[in-house]
Amino acid sequence: MPLYDLLATRFGRFRHTHSSRTRRCRPATDLVRGLTTAAGVLIALPTGLYCLPVCAQVAAYNPYADSQDSPPPVSPDGTIHWGTFYKSAALQKSYERLWNLGACRGSNKAITVPVEQNQLSIDSLPTVDFRGVVQGVTGSNSGGAVAFMVTSPDGAAATQRVAVLHPAGVSRVDVSGTAPVAILTPGMTVRCQATVDGKGRAETPIHTLHLVAPATDAKPAPVTPGQEEMIIGRVVQMKRGVLTLRVDAGRIRRLSIPLAEDATVQVASSLVSLAGVGDAVEIKGRLWEGEGSIGDGTVFADKITVTKTCLQATSSTARIPSSPKSP
């Protein structure tokens, strides 16, 4: 059955499966995008996912079995299952090539032993809590990554780590706090208290906006001219201190809202893409510092909590961690 596969990159990859071998392997195209941070070091991170038929080894491994079920990404008690991480993507690709040629069917230990040693069961790693500062963000809640800097309480040298989100999008993410209006992009939905005239123009500058995620079945409320009210609209553009919103109800559909110089956005979201450089972050996940890890270690994140603390516009991508560790 098709399940999630992740991180086909030059620093390795992992699959959501507990099998020591896949029943059937297919070559995959690496989809990589560079992420750099203030430290000036380049890291390659994934820009996409792909799916493969994988299976879990419950009884003796049978390469000719029609199907073997793999556990779900989240168990009934809420535990997140990660599956297998391949320390070397090159070695795994070589194995997949041999498999496609009809070789490497489980009898040649010169191949199977290195392949098994190349696999790491993420679920067997210890869970660790981290606190740090965001250095860069790439991707989405499904397989994205957050690079962050950790400073130990004893004042030792800071360490740079990269937290990877589960490819099935089940890592818990919370982003909250105060952000600059520069975080707003077309398509976002905001809420504010304002009064507009018959042409949809507000005269009083707005100091506070709230980023919201309306329910899919929510019905937009029309705007009443000359009446102070709570307005919910979709961002069209922000230019020269004026925010243009779209309201899909009533006679007035396009609003022009002037922003105060100190205007801010209150954020309460589950989108990791809203995290930015300089934000405080708390991460709980499984740490791997060996072969194939990035920077000072890769964290397979079960939970990420970001607190917006930067009041200056910053990009969510910056220069950070290094290439994966070699054996």
Image (spheres, rainbow, N blue to C red):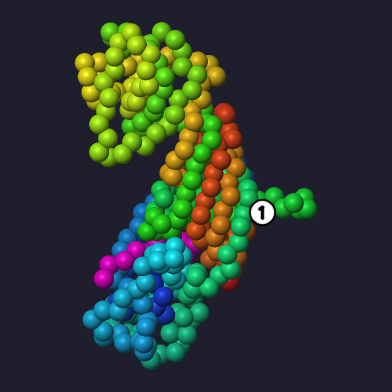
Q: Secondary structure at mark 1?
A: strand
Query: As drawn, is 106 to the left or to the right of 324?
Result: left
Q: Is residue 63 visible?
A: yes
Q: Is residue 177 magenta?
A: no
What amino acid type should be assigned to the residue bearing mark 1? Answer: Thr
Q: Which residue is mark 1?
A: 159
Q: Residue at horizontal 51%, vertical 61%?
A: 300
The picture places residue 285, in percent across and down from the top left corner, at 54, 60
Instruction: Quadrant for the C terminus, please.
Output: bottom right
The picture places residue 97, in percent across and down from the top left corner, at 34, 75
Q: Is residue 195 above or below residue 144?
A: above
Which of 9 and 268 lies nearest the eye of the viewer?
Answer: 268
Q: Mark 1: few, some, or many residues within 10 Å (few <14, many ≥20)?
A: some
Q: Residue at horizontal 31%, vertical 87%?
A: 62
Report the magenta residues as a range.
1-15
Q: Main secondary structure of the magenta part?
A: strand
Give the residue at the far left of this rendering: 251
Q: Is residue 41 visible?
A: no
Q: Residue at horizontal 58%, vertical 50%?
A: 282
Residue 99 occupies quadrant: bottom left
Query: As drawn, is 170 to the left or to the right of 282?
Result: left
The picture places residue 217, in percent across and down from the top left corner, at 25, 38
Q: Is residue 25 above or below residue 173?
A: below
The picture places residue 140, in percent across and down from the top left corner, at 41, 48
Give the residue at the far right of this rendering: 154
Q: Is residue 109 above or below residue 278?
A: below
Instruction: Quadrant for the N terminus, please.
Output: bottom left
